[in-house]
Image (tube, helix red, strand yellow):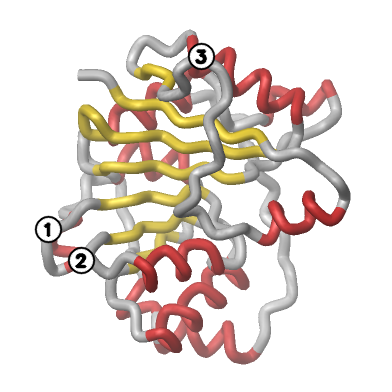
Amino acid sequence: MMRTIRSFVVRGGRMTDAQQRALGELWPRYGIDTADAPLDLDACFGRRAPRTLEIGFGNGDHLATLAARHPERDYLGIEVHRPGVGRLLLSCDAQGSRNVRAICRDAVEVLEHVLPVASLDEVLLLFPDPWHKKRHHKRRIVQAPFIALVAKVLAPGGVFRLATDWEPYAEEMLAQLNAAPDFENLAPDGGYAARDESRAATRFERRGQRLGHGVWDLSFRRTP
């Protein structure tokens, strides 16, 4: 079990009227209310298909874009900030996507208690909070217990993709994952991966580009 230090702070944020309506009207279609018991993902999506999980999807633009581009896949998103969840629901409704489901809950709890073993083909963690100050590094989500939880829910051969625009955090991620017994680095030199071209630019990535930040991508395969 992961320690109880949270890797996020729940911000109130401004909830628009449209987002509030979406949470009320569209949640039954796209949302999943969870208990501490494994989900039947086939029942949640109404089919069996390759499945991608995005942890911390923010405003949902990236997840909605992927869902529209790949209707043959199912997409599950976890986010604790309700305005972002509302925006995702609005986007999915506007584009007619039926292959997206959202969970509004701490991702560690979902990985630990809710998602079945080996139930996912891909996990995305894009631009997580780097917690810049040294005294806050303990809040960084990419640590050995979290990596073990991702390994638990990924099927053998499934891929864990990460990206950050904070180089010290990228170095820490790389070291942690290279040391993880359940993963192998897909970069031939054991370093960073080329940018995943299927990834739409996230809001945080675009902001980093405006600020002149680099971006470091990592791709790791779940070993048998």
Label 2 SS: helix
49 w.r.t. 86: above or below:
above
Q: Amino acid at mark 2?
A: Phe
Q: CA distance from mark 2 to mark 1?
A: 8 Å
On the image, the x and y values in percent for residue 52 come to: 34, 51
What residue does disc 1 label? 48
Q: Amino acid at mark 1?
A: Arg
Q: Is residue 126 left or right of residue 219?
A: right
Res 47 seen here: yes
What residue does disc 2 label? 45
Q: Alpha-carbon neighbours of circle 1 within 10 Å: few (<14), some, or many (≥20)?
A: few
What residue does disc 3 label? 189
Q: Quadrant of residue 169?
A: top right
Label 1 SS: loop
The tag earlier along the polypeptide, 3 or 2, is: 2
What residue is at 36 percent from the left and 10 percent from the top? Answer: 181
Contact? badges 2 and 1 (CB < 8 Å):
yes
Foreground mark, 3 or 1, reads 3
9 w.r.t. 3: above or below:
below
The tag earlier along the polypeptide, 3 or 1, is: 1
150 w.r.t. 82: above or below:
above
Q: Alpha-carbon neighbours of circle 3 within 10 Å: few (<14), some, or many (≥20)?
A: few
